[in-house]
Image (cartoon, rainbow, N blue to C red):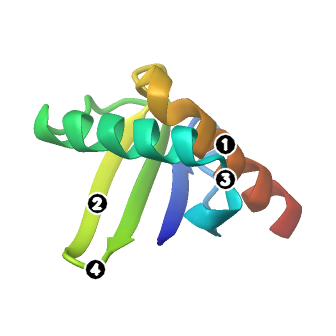
Amino acid sequence: MRVTLETSGGYGGLRSTASIETEELPAEDVVRGLQALEAYAASGPPAAGPRPRYRMTVHRSSGPLVVDLVEPDVPADARPLLTELLKKSRSQG
């Protein structure tokens, strides 16, 4: 399954995009991360402000799950997935 990250916001307002296949990550991190993203998505939109913002899209066979996250409110269980995507984003930039 593919997960795509789009970043924006912060004081610099820089934008970037990265994708990763979940098969490249430890299965336990993926399961916990996806569960955390689903729970976060159900909680409503994040607050506005100059903090870094992330849009994670989980490309599932049942349809995409799009989750908007904002620092520092990223769920702890989603952090490993976000960290890997941010590493990819930096290496592409």
Dot 1 and dot 2 residues touching (CB under 8 Å): no
> Which amino acid type is shown beneath numbered disc 1?
Gly
Given residues 67 and 29, the one toward you in this image is 29
Q: Which residue is mark 1?
A: 12
**Disc 4 designates what residue?**
61
From mark 1 to mark 3, how far is it between C-alphas?
A: 30 Å
SS assignment at label 1: loop
Write down the residue under mark 2.
66
Dot 4: within a 10 Å radius of its alpha carbon, few (fewer than 14), some, or many (20 or more) residues? few
74 versus 4 height, above or below: above
Mark 3 → mark 4, Cα distance in angstroms: 19 Å
Q: Residue at x 65, y 46 (%)?
A: 26
Proximity of marks 3 and 4: CB atoms separated by less than 8 Å? no
In three-dimensional space, the C-alpha distance between marks 1 and 4, rounded to whole angstroms, equals: 35 Å
Q: How many marks?
A: 4
Looking at the rendered image, the disc whose residue lies closer to the viewer, 1 or 4, is 4
Q: Which mark is residue 84?
A: none
Q: Are marks 1 and 4 in contact (CB under 8 Å)?
A: no
Q: Position of residue 35 (x, y in %)?
A: 31, 40
Q: Is residue 30 visible?
A: yes
The label nearer to you, 1 versus 3, is: 3
- Identify the mark nearer the N-term, 3 or 4: 3
62 sits to left or right of 14? left
| Residue farthest along the front direction in this orientation | 27
| Residue type pointed to by label 4 | Ser
Q: Of the two numbered discs 3 and 2 on the same chain, state the one appearing first in sequence.
A: 3
Mark closest to the chain's N terminus, 4 or 2: 4
CA neighbours of label 2 inside 10 A, class few (<14), some (14 to 19), many (20+): some
Element class at badge 3 = loop
Q: Residue 25 got which mark?
A: 3
